[in-house]
Image (cartoon, grey):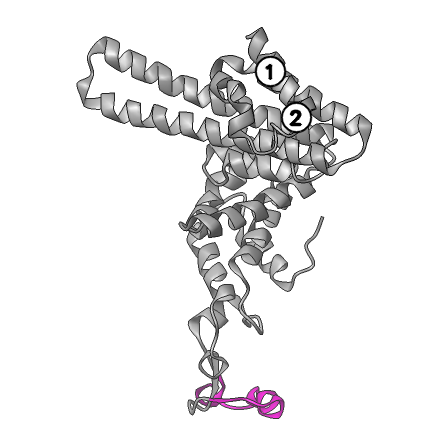
Amino acid sequence: PVVPKPQFGRFINLIRLKDANAEKVLRYCDWLMKSVDKSNATSCHGNGTDATAEESAQGDGQPPSKRPKLSAEAEEFGEAPAEPLALEEVAGLVMSVMLQHGHKTPTHMAKVLDGNEQVLLKLKPSEADSRASFEQVLVKSVFEFWKASGLRLEITLDSLIQRKVISPEAVAKYALSHELGHSNYWNVVKQVARKSLERSQVARTDLHVAKKLGKEDVLDKCQVQLDEAIQADERLFMIIFNSIVRGYEDTKDATLRGTLLARIMSLARKHIADIKTLVDTAESQIPRVRNNPDIAAVFKLVSTLA
């Protein structure tokens, strides 16, 4: 889908598959987000006053020394928007253009990201709440673009997670807050959960190898990586189970409720070795489980089967 924004066309030309120039794209992003003083951006006769339409029309017949002087940004990127764009709006435009350029094959998308991922990484806020909003915009763009293709949806989201542009938690939050019954969305959640646990397993293996080989210089680093991976898994599965429980309570559709209970059962059983503590303490860890007999029963059953 083409985004109906005048800046979309400019981004189409700036974000390239070949000869990418992330710094130039970032300069354009900054140009769109900053408040531009029109008197400085286009000053007439060097006196800081805005040129009228009549003066602009006459400017073509004036000698170069008397024509309105444009700022460097205005010469490079054209007229700035009337009002500065919000960070999330700019990020959504950038992501939409990347998806447009990379839609042919996963290889095309990988090449687009290779040359332009730094744009998103440098735009990404450091403050937690702002970062979460930023990531949700990117995730929404991907879901909407690839809604009809589950495979490309999974591949694209996984690539963005691997590059640390978005987090597994952001993907799970979006997928489980939109169309709970959609199989493509649930497949994404399952993949995100599996990949997260795989990363923990890699960190666990690295620590084991470091201990076995006596690599004292990397032991602390490996332990920190493992601790961070385990905490990330806990946050992710809390988000998943909380979202499913909330969805179960919010719907009166018996079929959807049955589907959600089955999803809790299948996901918990598949990964019980890694999340047993959370499953065993679900009633105290996950809000509203103890007040929902059907969901509590599923967690108890999984716990006894482990």
Question: Is residue 108 visible to us here?
Answer: no
Q: Which residues are magenta?
A: 49-68
Question: 57 and 270: which one is in front?
Answer: 270
Asked whether, in this view, residue 224 is left or right of residue 94, the answer is: left
- The kind of residue on which mark 1 rests is Lys
Q: Are marks 1 and 2 in contact (CB under 8 Å)?
A: no
What residue appears at the point 51 percent right and 29 percent down from the top-left corner? Answer: 285
Which corner quadrant of the image does residue 288 belong to?
A: top right
Question: Residue 187's mark?
Answer: 2
Separation (CA) of disc 1 from disc 2: 24 Å
Question: 4 and 204: which one is in front?
Answer: 204
Q: Position of residue 93 (x, y in %)?
A: 59, 54
Asked whether, in this view, residue 140 is left or right of residue 124, the answer is: right
Q: Position of residue 270 (x, y in %)?
A: 58, 14
What residue appears at the point 47 percent right and 84 percent down from the top-left corner? Answer: 39
Where the C terminus falls, by quadrant? top right
- The kind of residue on which mark 2 rests is Asn
Answer above or below: position of 280 versus 113.
above
Which numbered mark, 1 or 2, is in the foreground of this view? 1
* Tag 2 secondary structure: helix
Asked whether, in this view, residue 78 is left or right of residue 103, the answer is: left
Residue to which mark 1 is pinned: 300
Q: Going by the picture, which residue comes out furthest to the front?
A: 291
Answer above or below: position of 201 versus 114.
above
